[in-house]
Image: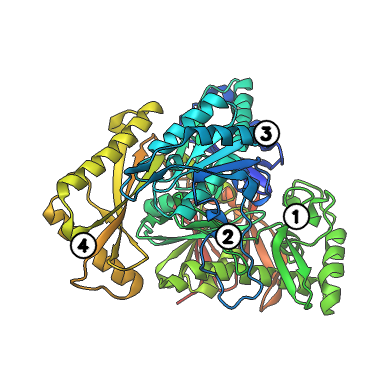
Amino acid sequence: MRVATDIGGTFTDLVYVNDEGEIGVAKSHTTPPNFEKGVIDVIEKSEIDQTAIKTFIHGTTVIINALTERKGVKTGLITTKGFRDVLEIARGNRPDLFNVRYEKPVPFVERYLRQEVEERLNYKGEVLSPLNKEQLSAVINYFKEQKVEAIAVAYLHSYVNPVHEMETVELIKKLWPEAAVTASYEVTKEWREYERTSTTVLNSYVKPIAATYVNRLHNKLVENKTDSQNYIMQSNGGTTTFNSAKQTPINMVESGPVAGIYGAAVLGEILNEKNIIAFDIGGTTAKCSLINQGEVKVSTDYFIEKNERSAGYPIKVPVVDIVEIGNGGGSIAWIDGAGSLKVGPQSAGALPGPVAYGQGGTEPTTTDANLITGRLSPENFDYEVDLDKVKAAIKEKVADHFEMTVEEAALGIIRIANSNMLNALKLISVRKGHNPREFSLVAFGGGGSMHAPALAKELGVKKVIVPVASSVFSAWGMLMTDLRHDYIQTYIRRINELNPIELNKEWNSIEVQALKQYQEEGVSEEKVLFTRFADIRYLGQEHTVKVPVPNGEWSDETLKEVVKRFGNLHEQHYTFKLEGTPAEIVNLHLTAFGKVLKPKMKKINSINSNIQEAYKETRPVYFEEEGWVETKVYSRSLFGKGMEVSGPAIVEEQSASTVIYPGQSLTVDEYGNLIIETGVE
């Protein structure tokens, strides 16, 4: 049996597939700060035989939470003499040039804990000055006195030659084996001193937190007699072992969200939909990503806490290109200083949760608004819902301020939330030159199917796909992933001067490194699949374009083909190409997949073709333009292949609700997915 669990801000989700290919789901409340308890709770709630679990895959928000809430450990930085303040200096670029409220990010490591040692390499990786080990020993003793728990080591040009970082780590482990230590070459071999140092520091900052969490989770599984191969979801869309995750936990910074994106790509491939907008609404956030021609875009230009007032903190590891905003089911509606209605980014979370939960929440949320407008039924909540309390909260906090009815205020909350989500969807589509009419929207998460039909129509998307088990779809995506490691090596060479023999040696060296790592993880060579990319730019440019390039031995003809591909992609991204202008490689990027056996989607039993058997009730639902409309409500679990529903309608399932607007229609496909035609011409 394969089991996947995903920790969200409000709920912890589980999907399992047994040896017969049957899929089951479960959902339980997230249990901060002891998140592993929520994982065990949802496993027990699913009633599966824990001793039968052979593969366990996990997605977690522990790392991103530790960073954003500043709950990492006291960290020291050791760097090359003269580079103590690289974290403080950062970059001169600002997200908004004319924003007088701009604030420079405060380094995670205070200046007194940033220490220099004498050592120096040139840009070729040649040693100019040897490592001063006496100074290094003094720094280690100083960190002991300051009660530092983790150490980051980032030396100049170590991405070319990590010899001094290796010597430093060896000495630290000899003199102070208890300290958690990260060398920059272990997390990234890309250039950019500031970004590389920032990534190394953040990895060290959360390393003990990650190790503690992963160990606690592993111990809980062992206590429950689960003898499984254990994996954790990474930000690049693949999985890695528990042990690897403890060494470089920064690769888990977007662990949970990217699984749903990858799952949407897999679903698109099954349904022959190559162009997908993946849209995930959870309890705390809404996330979206664009999949063009089946390709999930992965980038190392990732930041946390980047907004109009702050440049944020760069993390130079492969992360699926994803836009995330603080709008979900638990997002709180509030009035700002200017008297305008806002929704999010503050969230009621799992505790106390929305007012409807009856767990002490007093602030109205998106979930409460959907309940009042009839999109959600009180019967589908885990708790007994006091509708009078929900109405009173919306009346006091929103309706009275604008002198409107509770229903109008609730609809206003939904429309503001939709507007925020629409802006995020535009960021990944329209603003990047893509026509939404050429894409289908895959909606998942607890609130995805509730908001997606309205958003898709406004964006211009013709089709919405609501997958089976949509509320736990990110966990389903984990079941469909392979093991994955990305190896990115800065390798700056002009292509017209490049010797293919030299380049082949570099590719082979990276592939040998990948095979060695997989061998240590128990994956045989025949199950490892390589995909190559090269980051290329025109001479004199700063930005690069990631170009898919051939595997195997390269020749002069291969180099010509690569230049041609680069020119075409540059024109696609930037509307022009410079014929005859020399191009140069900046980074070599090898993606190594460890192929694993994945479950196949089963086609549904289509015996039930009578829509009346799925009918539950008719209730009033408040729509934007029509007002209160008597709306038929159906149970998704009783849908058969080919069933059709015309809007307005509500389709309910465990922990999710799909809203079909007037003028829209729904069809059930052979796998049980809901296919919604939005009415867009």
Select label 3 or label 4 by which is in front. 3
Q: Which residue is mark 2?
A: 312
Q: CA distance from mark 2 to mark 3?
A: 31 Å
Q: Nearer the viewer, residue 628 or 8?
A: 8
Q: Position of residue 470 (x, y in %)?
A: 56, 51
Q: Amino acid at mark 1?
A: Ala
Identify the amino acid type marked 3: Glu
SS at mark 4 in the image? helix
- Residue type of the residue flagged with mark 2: Gly
Which residue is disc 1 drawn over? 348
User: Could you say which quadrant of the image residue 274 lies in?
Assistant: bottom left
Left-right relation of 404 to 539 = right
Q: Position of residue 3 (x, y in %)?
A: 53, 34
Q: CA distance from mark 2 to mark 4?
A: 34 Å
Would you call the spot at circle 1 few (<14 residues within 10 Å), some (14-19), or many (20 or more)?
many
Q: Which badge, 2 or 1, is on the more N-terminal residue?
A: 2
Q: Nearer the viewer, mark 1 or mark 3?
A: 3
Marks 2,1: beta carbons within 8 A? no
Q: Residue at x 35, y 49 (%)?
A: 122
Res. 61 visible in picture: no
Task: Give the Cα distance between marks 2 and 1.
Answer: 25 Å
Give the quarter of the figure containing the C terminus.
Answer: bottom left
* Of marks 4 and 1, the one in the foreground: 4
Residue 321 appearing in the image: yes
Structural distance between the alpha carbons of marks 3 and 4: 55 Å
Provide the secondary structure element on which disc 1 rests.
Answer: loop
